[in-house]
Amino acid sequence: MAAANDISEGYHVPVLFRESVEALDIKPDGIYVDCTFGGGGHSGGILERLGPSGRLIAFDQDADARQNLPDDERLIFIPQNFRHLSRFLRLQKIAAVDGLLADLGVSSHQFDEAERGFSIRFDAALDMRMDHRSTLTAKDIIAGYSEEALHKLFERYGEVTNAKTLAKTIVQQREKMQVTTISQFKAMLQPVVKGNPNKYFAQVFQALRIEVNDELGALKELLLQLPSVLKPGGRAAIITFHSLEDRLVKNFFKDGLLEQEVDVNPFESVSREKPLQVITKKPILPSQEEMKINPRARSAKLRVAAKKL
């Protein structure tokens, strides 16, 4: 049985580690899910608190995560996106779980592997796929999306201030030059960069990454499954890194609804049952000390909810 410190720390520094693991209120004989195994940091914390009869189901769509699996018979690894949570729990003959943890976004490893195309620090192919079994890449989006689709994409997912101008520039420039690498893409955008270039490119890359990996779609599917996969009193702890994710989690934990599900019937009863009880009225934020050690933690927010008894 592996201890937590046997799991790779260099692969990914777990954000809000102590806060998120403690939020699960782990029972030694319980069944828990780590939706985003990555370097195994959060999983290690959960395993430390589980007894011999406890179980941990770990999901990760990135094949690289396999290299961090501990030799621990209590852990079952599922090499899939967490959007398939219910299906694979059924395959494991698990009706419901005592807790679930999800650390959303990109791992330190994915940012630091130049060839993955996630970081503006390196030159590499415009890829950005977390799961190499999927086919859509960032290059495909730049080469094939319409001007209107690009505009909406950068405005919504990246909150890029001049998203319309950016989209128009991409469509015009791709007729003159082929864009397959990060350096080519950044050169194409140079005339329309506003403000701090690093921040601007980070917003653009965030938008592309969210689209390539359908990150918000996967999160919505996960949230909708929570009421059925959690045992009464079972907890969900979700760490988000930007406002789009955080808003979805906040709304679902509070009302059991996704943000686009607005009640348009003023005569319908507002006493609809809410499946979850919010544990954290305000999100838990990383400490100043953690942000100094791990700059990636700066934008992290942890929200926790429990299935009502």
Image (cartoon, rainbow, N blue to C red):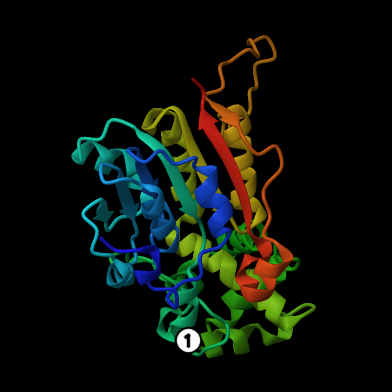
As shown in the figure, which amino acid type bears the numbered disc 1? Thr
Q: Which residue is mark 1?
A: 181
Q: Residue at x 64, y 45 (%)?
A: 247
Q: Nearer the viewer, residue 194 or 68?
A: 68
Q: Is residue 7 visible?
A: no
Image height of 93 relative to 17, above or below: above
**183 displayed left or right of 115:** right
Under tag 1, what secondary structure? loop
- Horizontal and vertical percent position of residue 108: 49, 74
Name the image quarter holding the N terminus: bottom left
Image height of 206 relative to 248, above or below: below
Total number of numbered discs in the rendering = 1
Q: Is residue 218 visible?
A: yes
Q: Residue at x 27, y 58 (%)?
A: 79
- Horizontal and vertical percent position of residue 214: 45, 56
- Horizontal and vertical percent position of residue 264: 65, 22
Q: Residues within 10 Å of mark 1 (few under 14, many from 20)?
A: some
Q: Nearer the viewer, residue 246 or 58?
A: 58
Q: Quadrant of residue 127?
A: bottom left
